[in-house]
Amino acid sequence: MIEYILLYFIISINYFQAYACFWGKKVSYTVHVVNNLPPNTAQLVVHCASKNDELGYHNLTTKQDFNFHFCKKPKATLFFCHLWWGNKNKAFDVFNARWDPDICVDHSCYWEARGDGIYFSGTWPPANFVLMHNWD
């Protein structure tokens, strides 16, 4: 019996966390990092994190999308990613609650790695990409 109560408790916590943005009147955001590099080249390696969340390393093949969701805390939320492609790399903020104006207009930050750099679209579906970062 105690196992069922514990299981119910764990499921309830996950349910409440999923709707915390709504209940707390916070805004939910999604960040996408997409490999749009030329085919038959090295995979894109992506590592993203915040002060409190380690999202790990991900190897993306061409056209593959790594994405994550979070609730924006005013003036406090910051996520960054480091991308590697062969001998090229770039580290940058993918979301910053202090951006003014908020460049993620539709609560979606869409980053795309291309051969000449990292492009950004703040709308969903993504459109009107802008080159934001050159590879180092």
Image: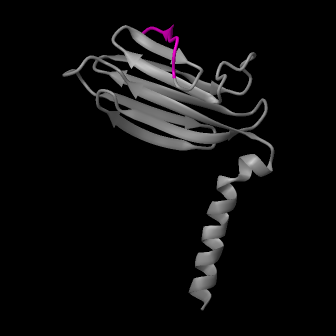
- Residue 47 point in image, percent of width and height: 45, 33
Q: Can residue 135 be seen in this view?
A: no
**Quarter location, residue 46:** top left
Q: State whether residue 98 is above or below residue 117.
A: below
- Quadrant into which the C terminus falls: top left
| Image: magenta residue range | 126-136
101 relative position to 68: left or right = right
Q: In the image, residue 103 lies at what x, y percent?
A: 66, 18
Q: Which of the image's four quarters has the N terminus?
A: bottom right
Q: Is residue 115 above or below residue 50?
A: above
Q: Where is residue 14 in the image (x, y as percent from the top left)?
A: 62, 62
Q: Which residue is drawn at 55% across and 32% down?
A: 31
Residue 127 visible (yes or no): yes
Q: How is the image coloured?
A: one colour
Count of numbered circles on the image: 0
Residue visible at 50% across and 42% down in the picture: 55
Tell which of 60 and 28 is nearer to you.
Answer: 28
Residue 105 image point, x, y percent:
67, 22
Above or below, comparing residue 124 to residue 88 in the picture: below
Residue furthest bottom in the image? 1
Q: Is residue 51 left or right of residue 136?
A: right
Q: In which quarter of the image is residue 73?
A: top right
Q: Is the residue 36 above or below the residue 57 in the image?
A: above
Residue under the point 49% across and 21% down:
91
Q: Does the magenta stretch mainly form a helix, a strand or a loop?
A: loop
Q: Which residue lies furthest to the front in this view?
A: 125
Tell which residue pokes out farthest to the left in this image: 40
The stretch drawn in magenta includes residue 15: no
Residue at 64% from the left image edge and 83% from the top image edge: 5
